[in-house]
Amino acid sequence: MPVISIDNLVKTFGTIRALDGLDLRVEAGEVHGFLGPNGAGKSTTIRVLLGLLRRDSGTAQVLGADPWRDAVRLHRRLAYVPGDVNLWPNLTGGEAIDLLGELRGGLDRRRRDELLERFDLDPTRKCRTYSKGNRQKVAIVAAFSSGVELYVLDEPTSGLDPLMEAVFQDEVRRIKQAGATVLLSSHVLAEVEALCDRVSIIREGRTVESGSLAELRHLTRTAVTVETARPVTGLETLPGVHDVREVDGRTHLEVEPAHLDELLGQLIRFGVRALTSTPPTLEQLFLRHYGDQHAAGSDQHGADGGRPAEASRAGVR
Amino acid sequence: MTALTGTRRLARLVLRRDRVRLAIWILGTPLLGYALAGSVAGVYPDEAARQGYATTSASSLVARAFNGPIAGTDLGAVVVAETYVTLALIIALLSTFAVARHTRQDEETGRAELLGASVVGRYAPLTAALLVVVAANVLAAALLALAFAGAGLPLAGSVAAAAAVGGVGVAFTAIAAVTAQLSVTSRGANALAAAAVGLAFVLRAAGDVLGEQSADGTRVASAWPSWLSPLGWGNQVRAFEGERWWVLALPVALLVAGVTAAYALAERRDQGAGLVAPRRGPASATARLLSPAGLAWRMQRGTLLGWAVGVAVLGLSMGVAGDEVNAMIEQNPAAAEAINAMGGGANLIDAYLTAMLGLFALTIGAYVVQALLRVRGDESDGVLEAALATAVSRSRWLGTQVLAATVGALALLLLAGLSTGLGYGLVTGDPLGEAAALAGAALLRLPALLVVAGVVTALFGLLPRWSVVLSWTALLVFLLLGQLGAVLELPQAALNLSPYTHVPAVPAVDPAVLPLVLLAGVAAVFLAAGVAAFRHRDVPS
């Protein structure tokens, strides 16, 4: 049974349709990436999962229970790191961690102290004086020292430095190893690639893509550059081949992964001297879903164009 | 770029953000003044009636303490006595809150940082806020002058009386400019400024109580403490009674001094910082903090302590002043009879003590509203979201806040009764007996405060976005019905809207159980509605 299961979820605020038939499935023990451009409805979905917002229609189940009706019982079994961490300004960080832990039903003191050390957080300072990153650390330490079954993390690392980001990734692996499930909303694609078993991409309140990273890659074109003994012809008529360009005797093109085989069959006849094939980067994948040119619809992923990759390749392997 | 660059743009921003508040303030004050002046004219139509009123007001220490020193039998003087303190308190609090809102609150939320990084001088935000607030005071005073004149009062006196009210606003604008520099939080800045308003009230009351009654019995010359109070200055203008225009220079002088001090403080501190460096605290929470109730207590205790000090000081001084009421009965039987009639036929000192307890109950209502609205503040700040994502139910969370506010109100009521009784008993010889009796009488006000708590809770559950404005409005309406209902000759049905109307006037009359039970019942309905609505709505909304 999935840990989180959402079907056709709708939530409106006045005339704004924040969630418009969203689906999401998170299986037990997986780290699930939850992605989408700003305003796509990620935080709204998470608040529905926490029973803070009431859904207008559709179904939502968390750990087999209704998040609205069974909120309190569920909250004993999950920990939440909000996207925008706000704390009681006149409590110290240590007090806030203890309070959040205790209200959730207790925390592991040893883990708490260990995490404070690892995240290099001074628990004696008042929350009022913390930076955004430090407030986030408070919420992360409180969540990770709770030993629950499900972690709901809403852009938990947006204020952390790279060193802390590494510590965070370590800790997520540790709770995954302990058997917990994680829903991780994030814009840090390297983090998603490093941690997530599966991802769901949402846009304008709807799920546009869901699956493992390998599966998602499969739906996007591969960039191919080939140098041949004789000028290549007949590529335009091959199925799944796009954007053929000749530059300095080399042929650049993009091909849908399903048609790679036919492409190679054609190329061989012209005497291949050199060939590079670059699978789509994660970033390209997301840009395609985030970008405006995609507004036409979400069921033609394989067919429409990816953006030029040169500018956006850095940072993602 | 100078330290004032960008002031004009920021002032426009302040106007845009506060257009509704400012409109209500600038139009509401004159309208209230107009209505009050008109009804005072109706109640005291002729010289004989005003003669009686003036004599009573000059003799009564209670009237002096709450209405200020009466300045003769002119209709204008009576209008001033009946309206000045109320209008001045309203405008003082509006001014202080507005200054804190546009200075310290912006720093606290980080908006000031965003603005400060643009082409905006160091003094520009403070200057913009002060310009708008002072302009609002001037405009409100100008309209108030027209309102008084329109109600048939002499023009010069109308202008003087309105300027006196506006001057109070200007004076507290200056004080708020300084308190906004001292405290790190806007809440703290408001608390400091509100404490200054309270101190000004007590100083003025003391000066007026200690003042001298004129030979003809219709005037009071205030003693020196009134001159220390910006609230007292307005009375010293003596509108309608040979206006002393030069007194109006005092608030202006205070404004200059306050602004200078605020600029000097702003120059010496970092953005977002106060004058006291932040301290460190414990690395772990104590067991007492680790529950909704423990947290509520922790969040509340500072506020409650401040209130307790204020209530105790006010109670003791009002109690001690009670003995002078006794002395007055002996000196002036006619005045005693008049007050006696106003106090509902009981003996004079009981009428006085009842009035004091009623006033405390109203004031502590402000504590209840302030304490309960923290939940809304937590919701807007996003803290509530984190708390409700833990294994604490919404009804438990809200119920704990209501309980904390109620326990705080109960403690303050007890303290009010004890300190008033103690003060009165110390001068009459039975401190413990009086303290016990008045503490008991004070507790009878609790059901009315429960209704206040109920109203705030219901508003928080049903109309969260409006809950702050509407809660304070409700309390203000209760205050106006209680203090001005009789002057305005409102029908009983209107007066009945206030829970305070239904509290038995103990010790002036014998306690009755039924109204208290009914009040508690109404409170329970409001509370249940509020909690139920909160359980079924979106958070945050």
Image (spheres, coloured by chain):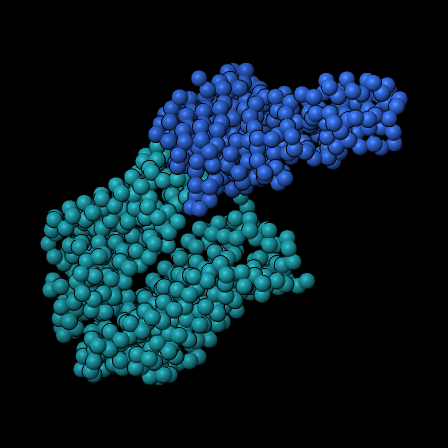
Give the answer, above or below, for where A104 lies relative to B204. Answer: above
Q: Nearer the viewer, residue B240 or A307?
A: A307
Question: Residue A238's quadrant in the figure?
Answer: top right
> In the picture provided, is B247 more to the left or to the right than A160?
left
The residue positioned 40% from the left and 29% from the top of the image is A59
Q: Is residue B541 visible?
A: yes
Q: Nearer the viewer, residue B276 or A58?
A: A58
The residue positioned 46% from the left and 44% from the top of the image is A16
Give the answer, above or below, for where B379 lies relative to B358. Answer: above
Identify the image quadrant of the N terminus of chain B.
bottom right
Q: Residue A177 appears at what percent x and percent y? A: 54, 15
Q: Nearer the viewer, residue B17 or B431?
A: B17
> In the picture provided, is B317 more to the left or to the right than B3?
left
Identify the image quadrant of the C terminus of chain B.
top left
Give the answer, above or below, for where B532 lies relative to B33. Answer: above
Give the answer, above or below, for where B125 lies relative to A161. Answer: below
The residue positioned 22% from the left and 54% from the top of the image is B499
Q: Residue B302 appears at what percent x and percent y? A: 39, 45
Q: Is residue B225 visible?
A: no
Question: Residue A311's quadrant in the figure?
Answer: top right
Q: Nearer the viewer, residue B189 or B391?
A: B391
Chain A is shown in which shade?
blue
Chain B is shown in which shade?
cyan
Q: Residue A175 appears at what percent x and percent y? A: 53, 19
The residue positioned 14% from the left and 50% from the top of the image is B515
